[in-house]
Amino acid sequence: MGKNKPNSNKFGMHVRNVLRQAPDYTKLAIKYKDFRHVCSLELNGKVSVNFRNERTLRELTKMLLKEYFDLNVDFAPGSLVPTLALRLNYILWIEDLLEPLKLDQIKGIDIGCGSSCIYSLLGAKKNNWQMLALESKPENLEYARENIKRNHLEHHVEVFAQTDKTCIFKTYFAQDTKDQKYHFCLCNPPFFDSNSPNPFGANTRNPERRPAPNNARTGSQEELTCAGGEVQFVQRIVDESLENKLRVRIFTSMLGVKANVPRILEYLKEKGLTNVSTTKFHQGHTTRWAVAWSFCTETPLSQGTSSNKRTL
């Protein structure tokens, strides 16, 4: 892992993120045929990318993963297409949280790996991490396992079928006779509340301060929504972390709505957790937030290198 501390540029992207400098899409379109087919040629000879087209987003992410990490990845039809810059920002933040521990071997848990299994693949390929990828949707499981096999990372990534969708990781822990311990978990939770009459209709941004996102929304209903949305999902992670304090050293999750960050921080406070840290992930017009907590007093998150630290 790199030793440089993050220093945000004007877009707030992590200093070690290879996508801080915009890729040369014209050169990449020449190099990658499938990506070239979803680009448009401008009068000046350069190509443009339509980020509001789902097929384009798929080919773009596949191309970037191949170009920067030599990963060959495919996605289940209709499944979530991950934005690579955001996923890298999250991985780099995890690196920063773990850096003070000076670990030789790192084990992590990917909660809801999706069909791409992108966090686990990046962690394994980029950092040689051992990853446990949890997923409940059968089609996503099939694609995730194939992506791992295709990239010869079977010895680095284990995929576990989460049959009980009300659980986070306790089902796996219950059957794990080796009582393995992990250094972190990460999660991109379903943002929207499936109990809402119009779960995708809620406007969570201030259009005067935050422009609309450039990217089209992708993902199945199951990947994007759950009862209570991201707040209740992350609260479930908190609840299960209380039952498994010694199994994971640093618990983390992403959040898609800024207003939900204080709600999670208050929930952590109610549960007696004081070793907590938060951060922001900036990717152009898109901003996400993340929260981390730990029961290990020898792992003071407030001394980490995250860009926005908070100890309750």
Image (cartoon, rainbow, N blue to C red):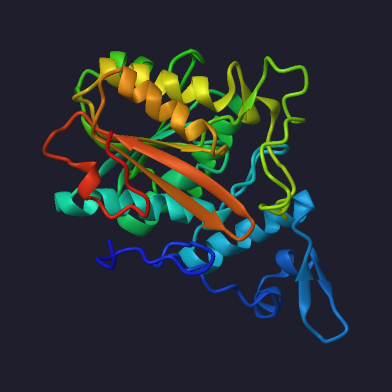
Residue found at the very far front of the displayed protein: 208
Residue 143 left/right relative to 106 = right
Q: Nearer the viewer, residue 183 or 35?
A: 183
Give the percent coordinates (x, y) of residue 80.
64, 40
Residue 295 versus residue 174 in the image, above or below:
below
Give the percent coordinates (x, y) of residue 51.
74, 57
User: Which of the 4 image quadrants contains residue 283?
Assistant: bottom right
Specify whether residue 169 is in view.
Answer: no
Give the percent coordinates (x, y) of residue 238.
36, 22
Residue found at the very far left of the displayed protein: 298
Residue located 48% across and 62% down the image: 13
Residue 66 versus residue 205 in the image, above or below:
below
Residue 30 left/right relative to 38 = left
Residue located 46% across and 20% down the image: 162
Residue located 52% across and 53% down the image: 86
Q: Which of 297 and 103 is in front in this view?
A: 297
User: Which of the 4 image quadrants contains residue 299?
Assistant: top left
Residue 72 left/right relative to 46 = left
Specify whether residue 294 is in view.
Answer: yes
Residue 228 versus residue 110 in the image, above or below:
above
